[in-house]
Image (cartoon, rainbow, N blue to C red):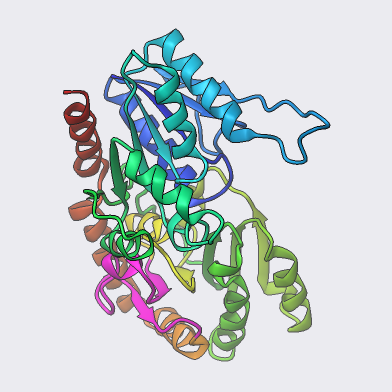
Amino acid sequence: MRIGITCYPTYGGSGIVATELGHELAARGHEIHFLSYAPPIRLDVALDRIHYHEVDVTSYPLFQFPPYCLALASRMAEVAERYGLDLLHVHYAIPHSVAALLARQMSAPRRLPFVTTLHGTDVTLVGAEPSYLPITRFAIEQSDQVTVISNFLLAETRQVFGTRRPLERIYNFVNVERYQPVERDPNPRFRILHISNFRPVKRVLDCIRVLTAVRREVDAELWLAGDGPERSPAERLAHELALERYVHFLGKQDQVERLIARCDALLMPSEREAFGLAALEAMACGVPPVAAASGGVEELIADGENGYLAPVGDIQALAGRLIQLAQDQQLARRIGQAARRTAIERFTTEQVIPQYEALYRALLA
């Protein structure tokens, strides 16, 4: 199949999932065309059957805000006609599903169906905003197929938009050949990793506070991978708490599998996670996740078995779990091995990608 994929190219779960999906589909023989205003952060155009088409948004004095949605729709229709695309798959509802809807209409009488995958904040934050709710609901209703990444998000979508249309839950996935445990020397300090886009919902400041509590009991450091609006406040808090020596801001990272494998635990204190992709990637690497019990992450982590869950905002509970892992190597090894098994048994590319392929084939049929 020839498939057009659109996602945000920034550091976030929806773009990462879309890019990895494109890579996996290309490896299975499909021709993949990415369309966005910049190359997605993990996109590898050196791979066979991967193509990238930039969406150029013209600045004009009349426009206070450049009309990206219209430029994207035009580019979608153009690429679909030129390369004979069979379908479009857009990730994150606004504005991508609206652009795909326009492109489908522009391509008539040629058939150009599109799939919308909802990832979380396009439902719980952006889509729920009064100014965007009607158009988001309309785009979801008009999509040829809609998928969600967790049962939690399926329920949220129904509640927020009141839609009764079919929604298919297809979990996120991980390549367990690329994300796997590695042999390494023990870290001189217990190393805690946090990966996110540093938005307020990720509660990055809680990571700093958790480290303060952990360091009262064990020698630990915190690695923060990613970037976003909460980075400066996090840097200030680390300075105020005299933790600069133990908090390392790593910026955006492409090859996170190498980074994860060098750490002892993943910390995810998010206020809400539609799925928790970073936790899954850590689990595949045999690194125990310690997360706030919020949303879809509870479908991924079984507390005390393959990771730990604690109430959102409970600094002491999160710190306590990390201290347990730091002080008991056998416990950490057992949790890490169980986490790896969960990734292998439920979330591999071999299990998930065929679900997307079947959805595409049913849509084209």
As drawn, 262 above or below 246: above
Residue 2 in the image: state x and y as whole percent.
33, 18
Q: What stretch of residues is rendered in magenta? A: 288-313
> What residue is shown at x 63% (from left), y 77% (from top)?
208
Which image quarter: residue 230? bottom right
Name the residue nearer the viewer: 314 or 222.
314
Residue 40 in the image: state x and y as whole percent.
54, 36
Question: Which quarter of the image is occupied by the C terminus?
Answer: top left
Which image quarter: residue 325? bottom left
Which image quarter: residue 145? top left
Name the residue nearer the viewer: 217 or 163.
163
> What residue is shown at x 53% (from left), y 53% (from top)?
132
Note whether residue 364 is visible.
Answer: yes
> What residue is shown at x 23% (from left), y 60% (from top)?
342
Q: Is residue 229 magenta?
A: no
Note whether residue 257 is visible.
Answer: no
Name the residue nearer the viewer: 122 or 50.
122
Q: Judge left or right: residue 38 versus residue 80.
A: right
Q: Is residue 307 magenta?
A: yes
